Image: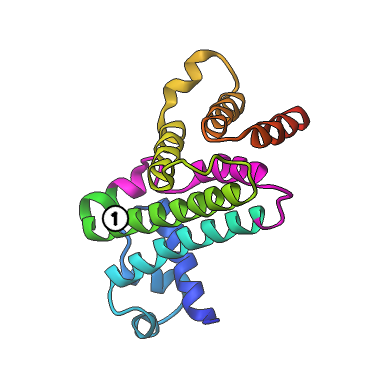
Amino acid sequence: MDVIKDQIINKSIELFTQIGVKVVTMDMISKDLCMSKKTIYEHFSSKEDLIKNTFSKCITAAIQELENKIKNCPNIIQQKFIILEDSSHFIFFKENQTLFQLKNFYPDIYTEMISLQNDSLKTLIKTNIILGIEDGLYRSKINKKLTVEYFYLIEKIIAIDDKLSEVNVNDNVVKKYFIELLIRSIATKKGCKELEKYISKN
């Protein structure tokens, strides 16, 4: 592990969030770290390279945390709840000033990061579906590719649509209910029993 590289990335995350991607300069990062610009450029070829590595690390860390949570799940149903509940916290789901600047001033990096996040989440969803079919919890004749896209699209809507709060129900309750509907749409009788068992305990 490159300690210096991690220090630079962590400081960049802090400054990008506080000040903005466009405004932050290599000089600012160098000054805050009490580190020469030469050292920074030994690890990153340009500001664009640093930005790309910084946001890539954020996404990778979020995916890794999610993978660790689902690793020891007793069954696929519980795993699906964790994937769909936790993925709404991913940085590229909800627009903020940092992402606004990234999108407008570094559009190629923004597009690449969106793809990285989307592909990573869809891979988790796809793996869950395949394992669920193997365990007899999901119907075997579903179109896996379309089901992945469907689950991902609904999760994204849940994550970004603030109008959900207008139903006057706790956001977590709404989210869990929507996830339940999603799972029921592909579950077998065995899967529905596992779903109901999970819901009764949570």
Q: Position of residue 113 (x, y in %)?
A: 34, 58
Question: Is residue 27 positioned above or below 189 on the image?
Answer: below
Q: Main secondary structure of the magenta part?
A: helix
Q: Which residues are magenta?
A: 71-100
Seen in the image, is 164 located left or right of residue 27? right
Q: Position of residue 110 (x, y in %)?
A: 29, 55
Q: Is residue 92 one of those drawn in magenta?
A: yes
Residue at image location 48% in from the left, 62% down from the top = 60
Seen in the image, is 193 located left or right of residue 8? right
Let me know if residue 159 appears in the view: yes
Closer to us: 32 or 14: 14
Give residue 1's quadrant in the image: bottom right
Let me know if residue 22 appears in the view: no
* Amino acid type, residue under disc 1 in the picture: Tyr
- Furthest residue to the right? 201
Closer to us: 103 or 195: 195
Q: Is residue 115 one of those drawn in magenta?
A: no
Closer to us: 30 or 149: 149
Question: Is residue 85 positioned above or below 19 on the image?
Answer: above
Residue at image location 60% in from the left, 35% down from the top = 188
Q: Residues within 10 Å of mark 1 (few under 14, many from 20)?
A: many
Q: Position of residue 202 (x, y in %)?
A: 74, 32
Dot 1: what SS?
Answer: helix
Residue at image location 64% in from the left, 59% down from the top = 68
Give residue 64's quadrant in the image: bottom right
Query: Label 1 belongs to which residue?
Result: 110
